[in-house]
Amino acid sequence: MSKRSREFRTVNRVLGEQPRIGPFPADQVFPWTVIAMAAYFICKEMLQASWLVIGLVIAWGWATWWTLTSNKNWLSKFVGVPRVTRGYKSFYSFVQQPETPTPSSRKRVRPRK
């Protein structure tokens, strides 16, 4: 067998990817519908705003939701990387009190002759 015949071929390139509806992730459809209905109700029914204002509020709500729930694809750029250094420090337990040596537990050292 040659090396080429042992390689795997990709049959369906969308296997393992996030489901999409056009350019938008499929998991955003329900929240965006709720955001659009809430924006319409608040802006049009309660505040009597124009369609331009309603469209801007809906776009703002969708963009905010998409940014907050983007699975850290975009926001992960802003997470700081910890600085790791080596050092030595005594361990102090917050749970247990430090043991203080009692006179009976001290070892007696005999002087050398």
Image (cartoon, rainbow, N blue to C red):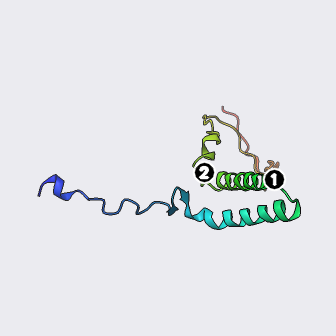
Q: Quadrant of the C terminus?
A: top right
37 over 23 or under it: above or below? below
Please tell me how crowded label 2 is: few (under 14), some (14-19), or many (20+) other residues with Cα within 10 Å.
few
Q: In this view of the protein, which residue sits in the foreground, 94 or 12? A: 12
**Residue 53 pos. (x, y %):** 78, 52
Residue 72 image label? 2
**Residue 29 pos. (x, y %):** 61, 65
According to the image, label 1 marks what residue? 97
Looking at the rendered structure, the secondary structure element under dot 2 is loop
Please tell me how crowded label 1 is: few (under 14), some (14-19), or many (20+) other residues with Cα within 10 Å.
few
**Residue 50 pos. (x, y %):** 80, 55
First of labels 1, 2 by sequence position: 2
Judge depth for marks 1 and 2 and give the one in front.
Answer: 2
Q: Which residue sits furthest front? A: 50
36 over 57 or under it: above or below? below
**Residue at (84% x, 56% y) in the render:** 49
Looking at the rendered structure, the secondary structure element under dot 1 is loop
Instruction: Choose top left, top right, bottom left or bottom right for residue 76.
Output: top right
Amino acid at circle 2: Lys
Q: In this view of the protein, which residue sits in the foreground, 11 or 21? A: 21
**Residue at (51% x, 61% y) in the render:** 20
Left or right: 3, with 67 as reference point:
left
Left or right: 29, with 60 as reference point:
left
